[in-house]
Amino acid sequence: MQLRPGQAALISLAMPGLSHVFLGKPVRAAVVFALAFGLFFAGYGLCTDRIWFIGLDLGSLGFLPGSLHLLIPEILNPTPYLLAHTLQDLDGPAALRHIRLPRESEHLGFWLMAGSGFASAFAAADACWIARGIKSLNPVKGIDLGPLRAALLTFMVPGSGHIVLGQKSKGLLVGGSVIALFLLGMLFSGGHGIDRAARPIWWSGQSPFGGATLLTALLVGGSQMSELSGRFFELGVVLCTCAGLLNVVLIVDSFSIAERRLLGLETEGEGKGDESSTASSEAASDAVPSEGGA
Amino acid sequence: MTLIWHFLVLVPVSFLVMFAFSAPQASDAKGVIRSAVPKAIRLIVGTAILVVLMQVFPALV
């Protein structure tokens, strides 16, 4: 079935995997669907209906649960989000209990739910890319993920997408800077700069640095605040958030670099900075539009 | 103290990442820095001029 790139992205956002089915990629469709729904409901199973109340005080109870700041980044995966929101059972005093009682492993649950949103966004970008009808004839190890691979790597570790694409020193410089910024933020905040339950709006900015937020959810998510993180705590939170937001720029950058490689749009100076980039350029020269677009 | 850390860490890293993004032709660290430094200087000078004007202009009016 023919889909325009924009249509493919929108359909994929509305129902993860559907665009890939239309575009003749059933296996990838199944993986995308399993990731988007599986991550969301795995996370929802850990944090239950508390997700609708994080960051809300008692005075906000009359307002719609799941306010705007809770929609980020799950809004990128709207179908399971709306499904879970519709099926919630919060009548009576249960709502108050959900606010006051943290769940065990809820930090991991929050990350998984957010991860489903990012998975859905990456899947939409992938569907858009497939719909453009460009594919490499030289897939790595039989799996041709295209620009998605670079974006996913950067999401987990800043700069790694650039390194895979052959821009080693650039990846080390910009990725290392973002990681250093994040580590400094964690140092200033005494290891508690990332806490979705306490500071959901800040967490929305931190979440694009997926690897770091996952690690902190696993390592320090459940630990108690200490007196050490007093004076510069807010500075630490700001630095961690800026690291996450800057990683969005790196994700887009690595995605677009991979796109340009495959489309043969590299400028003359590009790809000559590192030794490994020669191999990437050779792979890029193998990229051709597939027959008949999608 | 917080402001000093912002200028020491946050501003340089933000400049670096944003200017690396805005210069896709720079594929290595040297190219990124070479492209970022003049832009950063222009941005800082421009901001300084704007701040001075914001202080001076109301006083003149």
Image (cartoon, coloured by chain):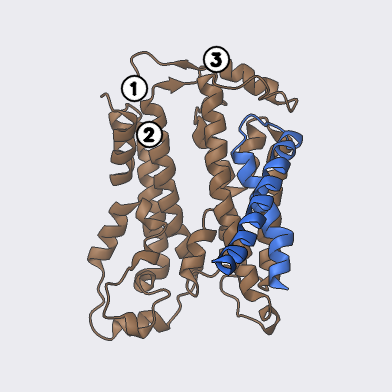
Chain colours: A brown, B blue
Residue type marked 1: Ala
Residue under numbered circle 2: A127
What quarter of the picture does the N terminus of chain A occupy? top left
Picture coordinates of residue B52, whole percent (x, y): 65, 61
Residue under numbered circle 1: A294
User: Dot 3: within a 10 Å radius of its alpha carbon, few (fewer than 14), some, or many (20 or more) residues?
Assistant: some
Q: Report the Cα–Cα distance between label 2 and label 3.
A: 21 Å
Q: Is residue A215 visible?
A: no
Residue under numbered circle 3: A286
Between disc 2 and disc 3, whose residue precedes?
2
Q: Chain of mark 1?
A: A
At 58% from the left and 44% from the top, the residue drawn is A250
Q: Quadrant of residue A269?
A: top right
User: Dot 1: within a 10 Å radius of its alpha carbon, few (fewer than 14), some, or many (20 or more) residues?
Assistant: many
Q: Quadrant of residue A206?
A: bottom right
Q: Is B35 positioned to the left or the right of A11 in the image? A: right
Q: Is residue A77 visible?
A: yes
Q: Which mark is residue B49?
A: none
Callout 1 secondary element? loop
Q: Report the Cα–Cα distance between label 1 and label 2.
A: 10 Å
User: Dot 2: within a 10 Å radius of its alpha carbon, few (fewer than 14), some, or many (20 or more) residues?
Assistant: many
Note whether A204 is above or below A144 in the view shown: below
Picture coordinates of residue A257, whole percent (x, y): 57, 31
Callout 2 secondary element? helix
At 62% from the left and 48% from the top, the residue drawn is A157
